[in-house]
Image (spheres, rainbow, N blue to C red):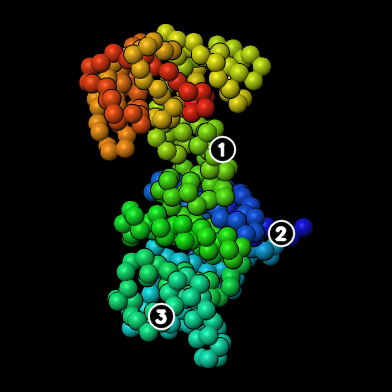
């Protein structure tokens, strides 16, 4: 069985009294795309730079392809990085930019140009070889940066916030291209972003970081549907976080009191006592009939293909944020509503 592409063993990085990465451990399988996700300052970019060799750890071991690279420089590691700014040479053509790493490594000019042209074709830029970066769109520049990275055929390809300079529609298209390229070439990719939707869309696995540590590690679906903390539930997609009491366990289910109502949910190991219920906005159904809870519409907003509501819930101090696909018959502000919670979109988390 082959070694993981990347392994961290209790890795820490300190800058004087500031801890940027705090005893982080994980393993990344070959040919997978793993995203480091978290808010600014959580340690995700420092972790990426530690993989790249741009920073040296204060403690712990880093392995790439089964080899210990903890003390090796960036040039001695078999990794390539696509930077947030793309870092293209403005005075070089597209082909020369992609050739640069090969030429610096000693590949003869003709062979380097041949390999670079093949990678440009792979990312959909055949015919752009003689343009300058200034003559390309943001998305095209991003693809040049990817071609320059993959032409070196690294063991691990690193992306640092690669879509942050693109507009919303282009971000969606380019992230699909990155994912397709990773799967087609069986690349091992470590991808850093603070954008939850982006992480959910491209990843085989997500490592959520908070305050220099791993908050939760799992598949996109497991993190979205079964967050293990208030932070993860709040950070991964929109979630209503409501205080509840788990009265008891009944097999795999918990009997949960939420305000004046009692409902049953899978407990996933959260013990009886005070807890929180993370309920997704699309998992709340509103209607004239009574549900588990009742309330009234505090705010309503039309967003084209859906309505967004703020609902004041009877017996609870917090309002619910609700997304409703029914735009034909919207609910009026002040209307009384019954509230039904869809168990598939709800998860219990420790307080």
Residue underneath mark 3? 127
| Secondary structure at numbered mark 1 | helix
Q: Quadrant of residue 82?
A: bottom left
**In this rendering, does residue 106 appear at all?**
no
Residue 187 x/y as whole percent:
59, 63
In the foreground, 234 or 48: 234
> Given the current orientation, which residue lies at the most extreme front position?
328
In the displayed structure, would residue 297 be above or below residue 302? Answer: above
Name the residue tied to disc 1.
222
**Mark number, residue 106:** none
Instruction: Identify the residue at horizontal 50%, vertical 86% (top origin).
Output: 113
Residue 345 at x, y percent in the picture: 48, 28
First of labels 3, 2 by sequence position: 2
* Marking on residue 3: 2
| Disc 1 + disc 2, Cβ < 8 Å | no
In percent of width and height, residue 293 lies at: 40, 13
Give the residue furthest to the left. Answer: 333
User: How many numbered marks have been drawn onto this rendered protein structure?
Assistant: 3
Left or right for 50, reference 320: right
Residue 137 percent coordinates (x, y) = 32, 69
Mark 3 and mark 1 lie on one chain; the one further toward the N terminus is 3
Tag 3 near tag 1, CB within 8 Å: no
Give me the residue at 35% from left, 23% from top.
320
Q: Secondary structure at mark 2?
A: loop
37 lies above or below 160: above
């Amino acid at each position: 069985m082959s070694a993981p592409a990347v392994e961290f063993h209790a890795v820490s990085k300190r800058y004087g009294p500031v801890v940027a990465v705090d005893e982080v451990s994980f393993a990344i399988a070959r040919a997978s795309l793993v995203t480091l996700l978290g808010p600014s300052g959580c340690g995700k970019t420092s972790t990426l730079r530690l993989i790249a060799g741009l920073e040296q750890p204060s403690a712990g071991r880093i392995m790439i392809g089964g080899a210990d690279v903890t003390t090796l420089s960036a040039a001695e590691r078999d990794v390539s990085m696509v930077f947030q700014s793309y870092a293209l040479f403005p005075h070089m053509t597209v082909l020369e930019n992609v050739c640069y790493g090969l030429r610096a490594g000693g590949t003869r000019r003709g062979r380097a140009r041949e390999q670079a042209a093949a990678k440009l074709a792979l990312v959909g830029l055949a015919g752009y070889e003689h343009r300058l970066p200034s003559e390309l769109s943001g998305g095209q520049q991003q693809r040049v940066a990817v071609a320059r990275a993959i032409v070196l055929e690294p063991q691990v390809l690193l992306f640092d916030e690669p879509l942050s300079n693109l507009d919303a529609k282009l971000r969606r298209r380019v992230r699909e291209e990155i994912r397709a390229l990773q799967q087609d070439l069986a690349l091992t990719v470590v991808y850093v972003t603070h954008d939850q939707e982006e992480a959910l869309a491209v990843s085989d696995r997500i490592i959520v970081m908070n305050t220099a540590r791993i908050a939760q590690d799992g598949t996109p679906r497991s993190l979205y549907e079964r967050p293990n903390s208030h932070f993860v539930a709040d950070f991964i997609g929109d979630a209503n976080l409501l205080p509840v009491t788990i009265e008891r366990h009944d097999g795999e289910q918990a009997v949960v009191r939420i305000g004046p109502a009692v409902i049953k949910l899978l407990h996933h190991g959260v013990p009886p006592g005070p807890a929180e219920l993370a309920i997704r906005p699309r998992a709340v159904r509103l209607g004239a009939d009574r549900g588990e809870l009742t309330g009234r519409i505090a705010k309503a907003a039309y967003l084209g293909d859906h309505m967004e509501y703020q609902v004041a819930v009877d017996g609870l101090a917090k309002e619910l944020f609700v997304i409703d696909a029914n735009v034909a018959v919207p609910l009026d502000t002040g209307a009384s509503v019954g509230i039904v919670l869809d168990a598939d979109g709800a998860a219990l988390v420790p307080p």
